[in-house]
Image: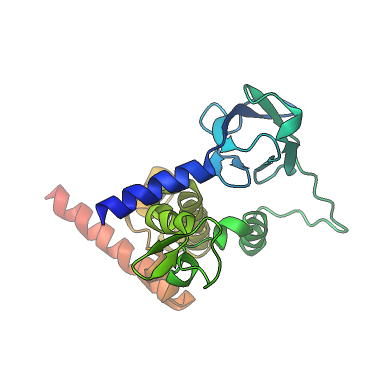
Amino acid sequence: MRGLLTLLLIYTCLNTFGQSINGIVVDKKTGQPLTGAWVSASKANTISGIQGEFSINADKAKDTLRVKMQGYKLYILPLNLVNSKNIRIDLEAAIIELNEVHVTAKRDRIKDSLNNRKMFAKEFNSSAPKLKDMIAASGSNAGLLPVAGVTIVPSEFIRALTYKHSREYKLKKELIRDEQNRYIDSRFSENLVSTITNLKGDSLLDFMDRYRPGIEQIKKMSDYDIRAYIKASKQKMMGDSLAKAK
């Protein structure tokens, strides 16, 4: 099995070898580096680092670099037109035009979530290859490897083994985690907790941090359940404080 895996790795590397493209992603107006921009080519993807830097393998002769980030316009760059070193990507802020604008202190969580899922649709819909994706149809031989009576697609086999370590998977998990936190914040809000407990300032923040429910817990709660939970947690907090004072 180890010999087979080594052979597949070598085979995949030879077939997917590309030129390393290096650059930086910045805000077009301010020139400030942008962290977390999604950079992709035809066979690879990555995320810009703390200083906006990125490095990605691509076929310079015919590949296209695509850079996207929430709040900015999609940036597309044919790589055969540029040098492969020190590429500067200037992202332009997206302007959203509305027919009618309502000013409110609250963000629309559902709308934000839908926009996120639309912008990062590829990442949200990504998944590890299934067995049927790793086994080629009979009669096809392009880039395939016969093993123990079946024909394996090496690139899909390697992707199945490494998917949970990919930047694509990590970004998907981060996007889902952010979406879940927004849902919790919308139901376990500072305004609601403060109204029920009369806590303010640091005491309120401490309560919010200590008794913040998890995503699976809050999904099972009705609005009444959440209010009851907050009241019970306030009583527990007071009881703990009295116990410490004795």
Rendered residue at 42%/75% (across/down): 221
Looking at the rendered image, the quarter that the N terminus falls into is bottom left
Q: Nearer the viewer, residue 15 or 208?
A: 15
Rendered residue at 73%/44% (across/down): 74
> With 235 as the anchor, is 165 left or right in this view?
right
- Where does residue 200 sit, x and y in percent of width and height? 44, 49
- Where does residue 28 sit, x and y in percent of width and height? 74, 29
> With 212 as the anchor, is 173 left or right in this view?
right
The residue furthest right is 99
- Where does residue 37 sit, x and y in percent of width and height? 60, 40
> With 81 as the anchor, is 161 left or right in this view?
left
- In this rendering, is residue 56 above or below 206? above
Q: Nearer the viewer, residue 98 or 205?
A: 98
Image quarter for residue 130?
A: bottom left
Image quarter for residue 53?
A: top right
Rendered residue at 74%/36% (across/down): 77
Way the structure is coloured? rainbow
- Where does residue 20 sit, x and y in percent of width and height? 56, 30
Rendered residue at 38%/66% (across/down): 230
